[in-house]
Image (cartoon, grey):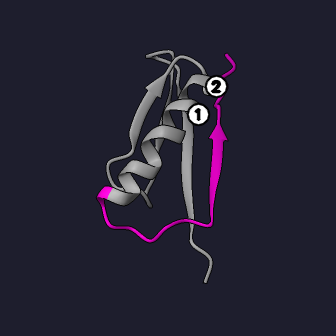
Amino acid sequence: MKNEYTIKFNWDDEAKVWIATSNDIIGLILESETVENLMNRVKLAAPELIELNHLPKYDSVKFEIEERLEFA
């Protein structure tokens, strides 16, 4: 069986930051002003949290990036 973890990136328009969360990786909540910086932070934090939470090693990580635009 393949172990895949999903990490979601959402834009918070009020705070003007991207937020990374995951239902699969306990404790993963990060924010940054750019997707690139957030991706770098996630690459460091996710493996560490997976190990600390005694989760199975992953075969792949899926990123879901969502930005909502509101028009007046």
Q: Amino acid at mark 2?
A: Glu
Q: Residue at x 43, y 41 (%)?
A: 45
Is residue 17 highlighted in magenta? no
Residue at the disc numbered 2: 36
Where are the magenta residues, as a range? 52-72
In the rendered image, which quarter is residue 4 located in? bottom right
Secondary structure, magenta segment, majority class: loop
Tell which of 56 and 71 is nearer to you. Answer: 56
Q: CA distance from mark 1 to mark 2?
A: 5 Å
Where residue 65 sits in the image (x, y, percent)?
Answer: 65, 40
Q: Is residue 38 left or right of residue 26?
A: right
Q: Is residue 48 left or right of residue 43?
A: left
Q: Amino acid at mark 1?
A: Met
Residue at the disc numbered 1: 39
Where residue 29 sits in the image (x, y, percent)?
Answer: 38, 39
Q: Residue at x 44, y 61 (%)?
A: 24
Q: Residue at x 41, y 33 (%)?
A: 30
Tell which of 21 and 60 is nearer to you. Answer: 60
Where residue 49 sits in the image (x, y, percent)?
Answer: 36, 51
Quarter in which the C terminus is drawn: top right
Is residue 68 highlighted in magenta? yes
Where residue 63 sits in the image (x, y, percent)?
Answer: 64, 48
Tell which of 13 and 4 is nearer to you. Answer: 4
Instruction: Estimate how packed mark 2 is, as few (under 14), some (14 to 19) or many (20 or more) residues with alpha carbons within 10 Å.
Output: few
Image position of 48 with respect to 11: above or below = below
- Dot 1 falls on a residue whose secondary structure is helix
Q: Are marks 1 and 2 in contact (CB under 8 Å)?
A: yes
